[in-house]
Image: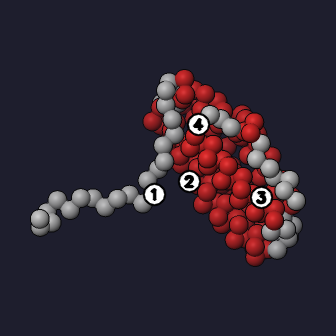
Amino acid sequence: MGSIAWDPALETGDALVDEQHRNIHAVVADLEAAGDDVDAIMGVLERLMAHVDTHFATEEDLMRREGFPGDQAEDHIAEHRKLTDGARDIVLGFRSGEITRGAPIVAFLCEWLTDHVHQKDRVLVDWVRARGGAARRLDESAPEAPKACSAG
Ligand SMILES: [Fe+2]
Ligand SMILES: [Fe+2]
């Protein structure tokens, strides 16, 4: 139990990126706690994908805003897509009964996240921080446009 401890070595130095990484890590720990209970696993995977989508969008927004060099950005985004596609295959695998055990999925996700943070996210954050930039929270529930014509 609790083998998915957060490793401080994964901190990149960007407050929001690190917060999102910690949240993803916590969901992977929930996945581990779900054991081989397929219904529980599916519920956690859904939450995981929502966190991952928001996180990848945050990093990709950061790349665009800061003008992160194109070839590096492409490589980085390609890894994001690979994980998103992989996660979708995992969900389908559980649905079809082809995958029945949670542990290999947890191991796969931990390894992917650790490698990706060290090899890709750190490079991005170092580059951005050298320019004084930082990730910003994407507004998922954009405030309503002001009602310019409303009375009063
Ligand atoms: Fe990333
Ligand atoms: Fe990341």
Residue at numbered disc 3: 29
Of 90 and 143, nearer the camera is: 143
User: Which numbered disc, 4 or 1, marks the residue that appears first in the sequence?
Assistant: 4
For badge 3, the amino acid type reads Ala
Q: Are marks 2 and 1 in contact (CB under 8 Å)?
A: yes
Q: CA distance from mark 4 to mark 1?
A: 20 Å
**Can I make out residue 9 in this image?**
yes
- Residue at horizontal 63 percent and vertical 54 percent from the top: 52
- Secondary structure beneath label 4: loop
Q: Are marks 2 and 3 in contact (CB under 8 Å)?
A: no
Q: CA distance from mark 3 to mark 4?
A: 22 Å
User: Which numbered disc, 3 or 4, marks the residue that appears first in the sequence?
Assistant: 4
Displayed quadrant of residue 11: top right
Q: CA distance from mark 4 to mark 2?
A: 16 Å
Q: Nearer the viewer, mark 4 or mark 2?
A: 4
Q: CA distance from mark 2 to mark 1?
A: 9 Å
Cβ of mark 1 under 8 Å from ligand 2: the answer is no
Q: How many marks?
A: 4
| Residue 72 horizontal/vertical position (percent) | 60, 31
- Secondary structure beneath label 2: helix
Q: Please rate how many residues cluster around mark 3, counting C-alpha atoms within 10 Å: few if below 14, some from 14 to 19, many from 20.
A: many
Q: Which mark is residue 54?
A: 2
Residue at numbered disc 4: 14
User: Which numbered disc, 2 or 3, marks the residue that appears first in the sequence?
Assistant: 3
Q: Nearer the viewer, mark 2 or mark 3?
A: 3
Q: Quadrant of the C terminus?
A: bottom left
Residue at numbered disc 1: 140
User: Which numbered disc, 3 or 1, marks the residue that appears first in the sequence?
Assistant: 3
